Amino acid sequence: MALNETQKKRMSIVAGGLILAFAAALFRLYQLQCLEHEKYEKLASQQHLTRIPIPVRRGTILDTRGNPLAISLPVNSAYADPQIIRNKYLTAEALAPALKIDRMDIFAKLLAGRRFAWLKRKLDPAEEAAIQRLKLKGIAFRREYRRAYPHQHALGQVLGFVGLDDNGLAGLEVWFDKELTGQPGYEIAKRDAAGTPMADPSLEGLPGSNGLAIMLTIDGNIQHVAEEELAKACEKHRPDSGVALVVEPATGEILAMANWPSFDPNTYTKLSPEHLAKLEHNSAVLDVYEPGSTFKPFTVCAALDEKVVTEGTVFDCENGHAVLYRRTLRDAHGHGRLTVAEIITFSSNIGMAKVGIACGPERVHRFVRAFGFATAAGLPIKGEPSGMITPLPQWTTYTITSVPMGQEVAVTAVQMASAYSAIAMGGKLMKPHLVRKIANPDTGEVIKDYPPEQVRQVVSTETARKLTEMMVNVVDVGTGRMAQIEGYRIAGKTGTAQKPLPNRRGYSSDAYSSSFVGYAPAFQPRICVLVKLDTPRAGSHYGGVVAAPAAREIIRRTLAYLHVPPEAELLANKNQKTGAH
C-alpha cells in the first residue's frame, strides 16, 4: 500500500530523529572514551583506591648529655567508616562508655556521611582495649604519636607543648616546629566491596621522614638543682615569680633555665586558658625588670676602662644622704668617704651616682650597650624582648644618676647573666645560646651546629680582673656574704630594686625585685648563676638575704657535680705541676 504524503513526512521525521539520536550517542561515547577519559578514570580510581597516611614521629628534644626532654610515644586513635555501619545509633550507644563520650556526640559523627570520622584521638590503653572487646564493624584504629615530657615540670616553660595534631603551640616546640614535625608520607591501597582498605605492593606511595632531633645546651642534672633550690627560696619568701639561670661563661651556653611556679606540659589541656597563660610564661627570657644594684659593676667598668677613675679613687658618700642635681639620694647604710672598690662592696647609691657623673652620659651609655643591654639575646623563644635604655639624646641629669645604680634601664635575666659572664671571662662577651645542634636521628647527620660565638671584647682583661676582685669582696665582707662557699671564692653582686609604679612615675615602697648574680670560682670561672625573686612577700626583701642563699646552693651543688675541686686544691695542683713552693 502506497504511503501518502503525510505518512512520508512522518517517516522522514522519525528517521531523522533516530539518526540524530544515534549521532548524539556516538558523540557522547567518543566524549567519554576519548575527550574525558582521564577524568572518569580518575574518578573510578578514587572510588576503588584510597590514600592511607603514614604517621611520622615528631623529633625528640634532648639535653646536652643526650637525655630525652620531649619524646613522642606510639598510640592508637579510633575512627569509623560510617557508610558500612548499619545501625549507627546502637553502635554509638555501645561506644559511649568505652570512649567516655556522650552517645549523641558519637551518633552525630556517624551520620555525617563521610567515609572517615575520628571518634577519639590518642587513646589510653584502657579505652583501646574496651573498643577492641566490642568487635564492631566499621570501627578501626590508626597509629599516631602522643607527645610526652618525661621530667614533667622540669624545663616546662622552655620546652612548651604541642596540640592534638602534634603542631607546636608554645616554647621550643613552636619555634622549631618545622624541624621537629618531619615529612608525613602515605601509601595507596585498594578498597574491597565493603570499603575496607587492602594493601597492594604494586601501588606506590610516598615514604615519610621522622622529625629532626634538637639537642639543647641544658644539662638535666644542673636544671634539677636550679629548679629545686629556686623552689625552696620561693616557698620560703612567697614571691609572685622566680627565676634561676646557670650559664657557662666560656661558651655562653645556658646550662639551666628555671622558672617558678613550675609548669608540667603533660597536663596543659587540663588548665583554664587564663591559668595556662600564666604558667607557661617563660619569665627568664620574656620579663624585663629594673635590676637595681646588680647593674652597678657596668658603670664602674666604663669608668675604669676609660681611665676616669681607679679602684682607689675616693668619693664622699655623705653619710647616706646627698642631693645631686636637686635630686635626693639615700643609702640603706650611711658611709663617708669610700673608694670605688668600697662603693661596689657596700653598694652605695650615692657613690655610684658620683662615679656615673664623673664618667659622663656618653661613656656610660656606650658601655651599657656594649655589654648587650637593650639588644635581644637572640634565643629561640617567641616574643623575646630587647630591654630598654633611654636613648642618649634624651639623657638628663636625672638619668646620669639613675642608670649607674640600675634605674631607668630594663633588662632580662639572660642579658644580666650574659653580661656578668663577660666580666668573668676577662671582658669577652659571648652570645648566649640554648641549642647545641640539630641532627637527623636516623643517620646521625648534623643538620645545623651552634658553636660558641664571641660577640665582642667589651672591656680590657685588666678592667675585668679588677671588677672580679671588687665582687669577691662583696661576697667576703659586703652585701653578698650569704653566698659564701667554703673552699671557693665567689664573685657576685646583690640587688634590691624598688619596682616602678605602673602607669605613673615613681617607685613602689613595698614591691621589690630581689636578686643575686655571681660566678665561681672567681678567677677560674666555670659557671655564672643568677637568682631573682619578683616581689617576695614573706621575710626579708633584700637580695642578699632572699636570692644569695639560693644562688650559693646552686653554685655549690653544680661545682660538685662538675667535679671542680676547691681552690686550695687547685692551687696545690698548679704548684705541683710548675714546681712552685
Image (tube, rainbow, N blue to C red):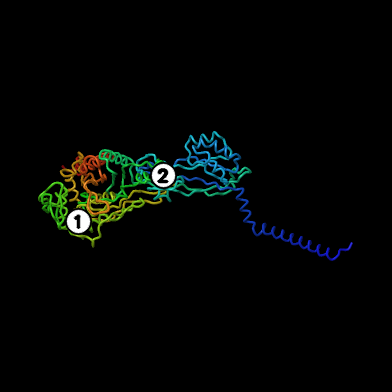
**Residue 575: which numbered mark, if any?**
none
Quick one: SS at disc 2?
loop
Q: Quadrant of residue 368?
A: bottom left
Q: Nearer the viewer, residue 353 or 341?
A: 353
Q: Position of residue 32 (x, y in %)?
A: 67, 57
Q: Residues within 10 Å of mark 2 (few under 14, many from 20)?
A: many
Residue 131 sits above or below residue 469 on the image:
above
Report helix, strand or loop for mark 1: helix
Q: Residue at 15% across / 57% down in the picture?
A: 326
Mark 1 residue crowding within 10 angstroms, few (<14) / some (14–19) / many (20+): many
Label placed on residue 302:
1
Q: Position of residue 282 (x, y in %)?
A: 33, 47
Position of residue 171 in the picture relative to residue 405 (left or right): right
Circle 1: residue type: Ala
**Residue 22 horizontal/vertical position (percent):** 74, 59
Is residue 527 visible in the rendered structure shown here?
no
Of residue 351 and residue 279, the one placed in the foreground of this image is: 279
Q: Identify the image quadrant of the C terminus.
A: top left
Looking at the image, tell me whether mark 1 or mark 2 is earlier in sequence order.
Answer: 2
Q: Of the residues shown, which amino acid type is indicated by label 2?
A: Thr
Picture quarter containing residue 29? bottom right
Q: Position of residue 421 (x, y in %)?
A: 25, 49
In the rendered image, the quadrant that contains the N terminus is bottom right
Residue that label 2 marks: 60
Q: Is residue 474 left or right of residue 52?
A: left
